[in-house]
């Protein structure tokens, strides 16, 4: 009888522990991003950046833990589309992507340009004027998708890579004529390379219809609406209580 009671007690304890573990897992989100400074990047083994701290603040507000992982954008983009309850940031919202994700809200400002080297004196009135030049892009990122939708072609006038800093080097070395990039990242990477952005980058064309509302945090399409709404409310809260503005002042 004693051993029977002990077995029952052990089983109960195991069940309780497993239940707690299951709850903890349920309250932890898989969060995917890429190396995209100053929005999100790895420093000293930890993922940081303006967008990262915004997402962390939202998760703290709604009492969720985040399991953050940085990977090449194409892989993060594909994973976030096909796995349940996966959060991705910083992601541009476009008509092409609209139904692929459930959009939580805007977490960071952005402005895209076609950058060139100042001595080239390239300036365009229309985007299609850039088609006769070689433009550096990143595989499956919003800039590349935008240009492809406008009639640019990978392997012809688009040179795709997997890292943003590689594209800056391509531009500096004259291996491409143009580089499509959001302003904050372009300036950050130029400074990181030891250059003065005012001397190494020229804004050849402003792309106002690409991501003008900013970068988002978004969920895979099969994520329950309740979870999406929960984070949406958290984002609204940190924007209204001063947390978001404090992070902007710190990073931007």
Image: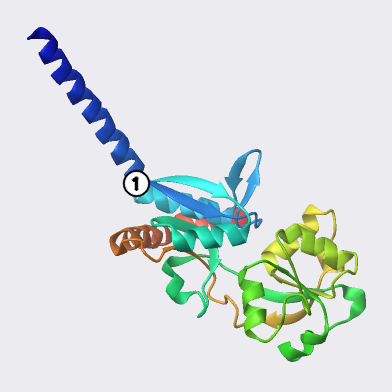
Q: Position of residue 151 (x, y in %)?
A: 68, 86
Q: Residue at x 15, y 13 (%)?
A: 6
Q: Residue at x 58, y 46 (%)?
A: 47
Residue beneath disc 1: 63
Considering depth in this image, is 165 or 14 the residue closer to the camera?
A: 14
Q: Position of residue 105 (x, y in %)?
A: 44, 67
Q: Is residue 89 above or below residue 180?
A: above
Considering depth in this image, is 157 or 37 the residue closer to the camera?
A: 157
Q: Is residue 242 above or below residue 9?
A: below
Q: Judge from the rendering whether residue 33 lies leftward or rightward of residue 104; answer left or right.
A: right
Instruction: Name the image quarter holding residue 76.
Output: bottom right
Q: Is residue 180 above or below residue 128?
A: above
| Residue 111 appears in the picture as rendered | no
| Residue 13 appears in the picture as rendered | yes
Q: Residue at x 45, y 57 (%)?
A: 87
Q: Position of residue 3 (x, y in %)?
A: 13, 10
Q: How many marks?
A: 1
Q: Residue at x 78, y 59 (%)?
A: 166
């Amino acid at each position: 009888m004693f051993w029977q009671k002990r077995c029952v007690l052990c089983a109960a304890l195991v069940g309780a522990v497993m239940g707690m573990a299951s709850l903890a897992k349920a309250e932890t989100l898989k969060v995917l991003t890429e190396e995209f400074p100053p929005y999100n990047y790895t420093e000293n083994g930890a993922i940081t950046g303006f967008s990262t701290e915004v997402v962390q603040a939202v998760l703290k507000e709604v009492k969720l833990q985040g399991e953050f992982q940085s990977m090449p954008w194409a892989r993060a983009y594909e994973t976030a589309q096909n796995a349940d309850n996966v959060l991705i940031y910083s992601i541009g919202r476009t008509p092409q992507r609209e139904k692929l994700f459930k959009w939580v809200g805007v977490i960071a400002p952005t402005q895209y340009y076609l950058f060139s080297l100042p001595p080239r004196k390239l300036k365009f009135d229309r985007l299609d004027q850039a088609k006769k030049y070689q433009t550096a892009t990143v595989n499956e990122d919003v800039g590349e998708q935008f240009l492809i939708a406008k009639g640019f072609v990978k392997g012809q006038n688009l040179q795709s890579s997997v890292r943003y800093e590689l594209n800056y080097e391509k531009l500096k070395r004259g291996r491409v004529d143009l580089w499509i990039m959001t302003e904050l990242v372009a300036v950050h990477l130029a400074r990181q390379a030891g250059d003065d952005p005012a001397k190494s980058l020229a804004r050849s064309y402003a792309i106002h219809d690409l991501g003008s509302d900013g970068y988002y945090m978004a969920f895979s399409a099969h994520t329950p609406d309740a979870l999406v709404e929960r984070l949406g409310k958290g984002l609204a809260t940190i924007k209204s209580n001063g947390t978001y503005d404090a992070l902007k002042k710190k990073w931007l």
